[in-house]
Amino acid sequence: MDWQKLWQDFDDSPLVRHEFAGNALPVWLIAAAAFITATFVLRLVVAIVRKRAQTIAERRNSDLARAVAGLATATKWWFLLIVSLFLASLVLKLHQRQMEFMKSAAIIALLVQAAVWSDVLIRLFIERYMQRRMESDAASVTMMSALGFLGRMATWVLATLLILENLGVEVSALVAGLGVGGVAVALAAQNVLGDLFASLSIVLDKPFILGDFIAVGDFLGSVEHIGLKTTRLRSLSGEQLVFSNNDLLQGRIRNYKRMFERRIQFSLGVEYSTPPDQVAAIPGMIREAIVDQGKTRFDRAHFKSFGDSALLYEAVYYVLSPDYNLYMDIQQAINLTLVRRFASEEIQFAFPTQTLYVHKADGAPSAS
């Protein structure tokens, strides 16, 4: 078989010589092969990089490998197709307008994919930062979470402006128009903007942070989320409480997480029939009951006043921890100690009583 003659006949055939959109059939076949090859190679490379990075991240707990795996996972299939199509178009002879279209499509795809990559990197950084610093520095976690949102928003805004500029839109005029429209929007959305600025105030001033247990009016709960418009608490009974940021800062907030110690004041009463020596000794008994518990700092104990049916005592001490359960355990132990001590000293706790004086017919009073 004469391969040279066969090739010459093929090369001289009208089908091969005929041009489609300015390119002969072999050129189109080469471009198609380049497109298929580039698509296959790019997807294969992304899959290999993702799998390899995930393996390294699991074995070595590497943040860099975890970031590479996240970027590979976030690489979109349509981005690889557009890149392959652009590479294949380089083989073809295209008109100037067609080349500009392909170039613009590739640039837009790259900008969108770059924004996706940036968004993933910011998310991964914030998540890793939160895992490392949540227990030691929750305030910085709250701030970084808000800054991360602003960074992601700025990334997409910048990508959108670059895409519009690539499409031939006058970006400076658009920004100026948006500025004028923004004034009208601001007037129409004062409440939303008030909540937005309130969220920035919460992040910067830090009256509370994620994980703090706070009281707002009659509501108590742990801070679960600080958003741009609302802050969410998880109450003791389990339901979620949602507060507008602006309304939240206008009220009074009590932050129990930042309480270093707890001041406790309690009272008790004994019967009026208690002997004077025992009346004088009771403050000392209260002091001993408090000091013996540990993790407390005694402040005072006094015979306070004469009540309607009891001699009243008042004591103050500090629990050297904000833990409420610890406070209740200590107070319970103090109460039990005083009950045992008073029983051994034959001191009676007072309870509401009344004494009635009845006058007899001869005028002499008698008590009953």
Image (cartoon, helix red, strand yellow):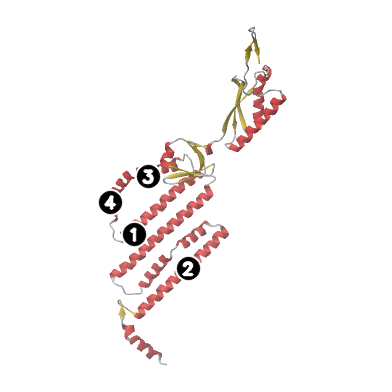
Residue 65, how many percent across, how many down?
51, 59
Residue bearing the label numbered 1: 163
Q: Which is nearer the N-term, disc 1 or disc 2?
A: 2
Q: Residues within 10 Å of mark 4 (few under 14, many from 20)?
A: few
Amino acid tagged 4: Gly
**Mark 2 element type:** helix
The label on residue 192 is: 3
- At a point 38% along the width and 89% down the height, the residue shown is 6
Amino acid tagged 3: Val
Marks 1 and 4, how far apart at CA: 18 Å
- At a point 41% along the width and 60% down the height, the residue shown is 114
Please determine whether, in this image, residue 223 is positioned above or below residue 280.
Answer: below
**Mark 1 element type:** helix
**Mark 3 element type:** helix
Amino acid tagged 1: Ile
Q: How many marks?
A: 4
Residue 217, how many percent across, how many down?
47, 36
Q: Can you tell which quarter of the image residue 340 is in? A: top right
Residue bearing the label numbered 2: 45
Amino acid tagged 2: Val
On the rendered structure, is 188 left or right of 342?
Answer: left
| Nearest to viewer (mark 4 / mark 3) | 3
The label on residue 177 is: 4
The reply to whether residue 293 is visible in this rendering is: no
Please determine whether, in this image, residue 101 is positioned above or below residue 314.
Answer: below
On the rendered structure, is 186 left or right of 128?
Answer: left
